[in-house]
Image (tube, rainbow, N blue to C red):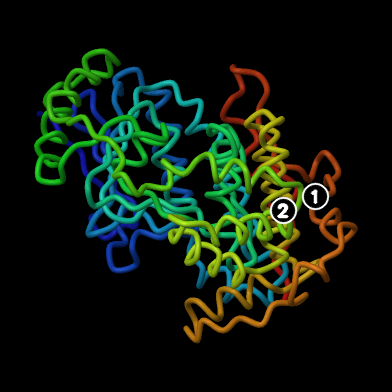
């Protein structure tokens, strides 16, 4: 088979093998975190291949022991003193998210290891997402003062009942079996068979959805969540996470934690109480808005939230959260405000305020112009990053 491979030192590898296109996230020592360069290369490949009549099937995988751990937190932290230093990567990531959700060619994600936050946005929206016994998914952004982004305020809010609020607020982890049961992945394939599946898909040399599905099902096994899975606790989750405010959710969860057989709640509750009060409140509102929004509306909202949070217009919690987790690693963040009682609704309102139209994330409305709205054509591109 004719094969074209780009520079193997690149952070994203792109291979062209007849009618198959293979993307490999290639920062294994950094758990394939998403940097500005990663986003730019992904967008470049996906646009090129969607427009290429010869390209029929796009496969994406991670190198090393992770699929992708999500956004590069150090990048955000290092840019804290330079206004909007990370605006470009945020704009490009959310714009790309729309195109991944609406992509015109058949896509398969082969996911082992960590798939978290923005990394999971390269898995969940795919036509086919294959997970293994080593896959770990989570959206833990609220705990560090950020919010559930990269389309997940839309995706999680459309899960049954109030699972969306639960996963977004707690950052609870899901394994491969749970991802399939929750509808966040399509197939479970044992890790030992994953490379054989990849070879099978490449040899299939076709983007025909039925043929691709049949090929995956040759390797897939039927799975059910373990008995102790949080997916089997939905009645409790719905009861607690349907409450109007984060404070009421926590109070209700505390009551449930005292009941026999609910020992699983205590560590989840502990994590909630350690999380950024501001991050939790923003995230709860975002998920609830996402339930009533279209995908483009959710992505535009997430862009506003990200820019306002990184600009620290109401709190510097996101930088404090990253410091405590990944820089100093003391796991002792000092939140401001320190409790849910001190984060007034009027402050939370500020980060949700729409921008002027030209400064919003530009998601194309017409199919014939679907790759318009790029960052370089936005007014942001003409602004210089300032210290």
Task: Indicate the quadrant where residue 287 lies.
Answer: top right
Between the residue at mark 2 and the residue at mark 1, the CA separation in whole angstroms equals 6 Å
Instruction: Say left or right for 198 vs 91.
Output: left
**Circle 1 residues within 10 Å: few <14, some 14–19, many ≥20:** some
Instruction: Say left or right for 174 vs 77.
Output: left
Instruction: Say left or right for 148 vs 54.
Output: right
First reached walking from the N terminus: tag 2 or tag 1: 2
Task: Indicate the quadrant where residue 94 lies.
Answer: top right
Q: Viewer-proximal residue, 236 or 268?
A: 236
Q: Viewer-proximal residue, 364 or 18?
A: 364
In this view, 197 is above or below 83: above
Q: Position of residue 370 (x, y in %)?
A: 58, 25
Q: Quadrant of the C terminus?
A: bottom right
**Circle 2 residues within 10 Å: few <14, some 14–19, many ≥20:** many
* Marks 2 & 1, CB-CB < 8 Å contact: yes
In this view, 106 is above or below 172: above
Q: Residue at x 67, y 42 (%)?
A: 242
Q: SS class of the residue under badge 2?
A: helix
In this view, 18 is above or below 97: above
Residue 10 in view of the camera = yes
Instruction: Say left or right for 9 vs 345.
Output: left
In this view, 168 is above or below 78: above
Residue hosting label 2 = 305
Q: Residue at x 24, y 55 (%)?
A: 63
Residue hosting label 1 = 352
């Amino acid at each position: 088979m004719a094969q074209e491979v780009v520079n193997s030192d690149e952070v994203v590898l792109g291979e062209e093998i007849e009618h198959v296109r293979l993307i490999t996230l290639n920062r294994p020592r950094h758990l394939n975190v998403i940097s500005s360069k990663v986003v730019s290369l992904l967008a470049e490949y996906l646009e090129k291949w969607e427009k290429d009549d010869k390209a029929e099937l796009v496969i994406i995988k991670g190198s090393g022991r992770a699929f992708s751990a999500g956004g590069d937190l150090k990048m955000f932290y290092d840019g804290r003193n330079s206004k909007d230093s990370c605006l470009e990567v945020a704009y490009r990531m959310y714009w790309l998210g729309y195109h991944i959700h609406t992509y015109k060619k058949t896509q398969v994600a082969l996911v082992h290891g960590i798939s978290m936050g923005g990394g999971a946005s390269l898995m969940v929206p795919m036509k086919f997402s294959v997970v293994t016994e080593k896959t770990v998914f989570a959206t833990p952004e609220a705990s560090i003062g950020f919010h559930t982004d990269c389309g997940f305020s839309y995706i999680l809010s459309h899960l049954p009942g109030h699972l969306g609020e639960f996963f977004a607020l707690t950052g609870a982890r899901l394994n491969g079996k749970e991802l399939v049961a929750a509808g966040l992945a399509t197939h479970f394939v044992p890790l030992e068979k994953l490379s054989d599946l990849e070879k099978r898909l490449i040899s299939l040399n076709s983007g025909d959805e039925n043929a691709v599905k049949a090929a995956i099902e040759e390797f897939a096994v039927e799975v059910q969540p373990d008995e102790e899975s949080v997916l089997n606790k939905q009645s409790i989750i719905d009861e607690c996470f349907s409450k109007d405010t984060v404070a009421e959710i926590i109070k209700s969860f505390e009551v449930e934690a005292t009941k026999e057989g609910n020992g699983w709640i205590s560590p989840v509750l502990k994590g909630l109480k350690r999380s950024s009060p501001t991050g939790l409140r923003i995230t709860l509102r975002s998920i609830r808005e996402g339930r009533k929004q279209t995908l483009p509306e959710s992505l535009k909202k997430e862009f506003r939230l990200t820019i306002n949070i990184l600009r620290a217009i109401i709190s510097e919690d996101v930088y404090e959260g990253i410091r405590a987790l990944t820089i100093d690693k003391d796991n002792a963040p000092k939140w401001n405000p320190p409790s849910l009682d001190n984060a007034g609704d009027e402050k939370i309102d500020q980060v949700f305020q729409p921008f002027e139209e030209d400064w919003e994330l530009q998601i194309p409305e017409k199919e014939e112009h679907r790759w318009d709205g790029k960052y370089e054509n936005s007014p942001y591109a003409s602004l210089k990053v300032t210290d």
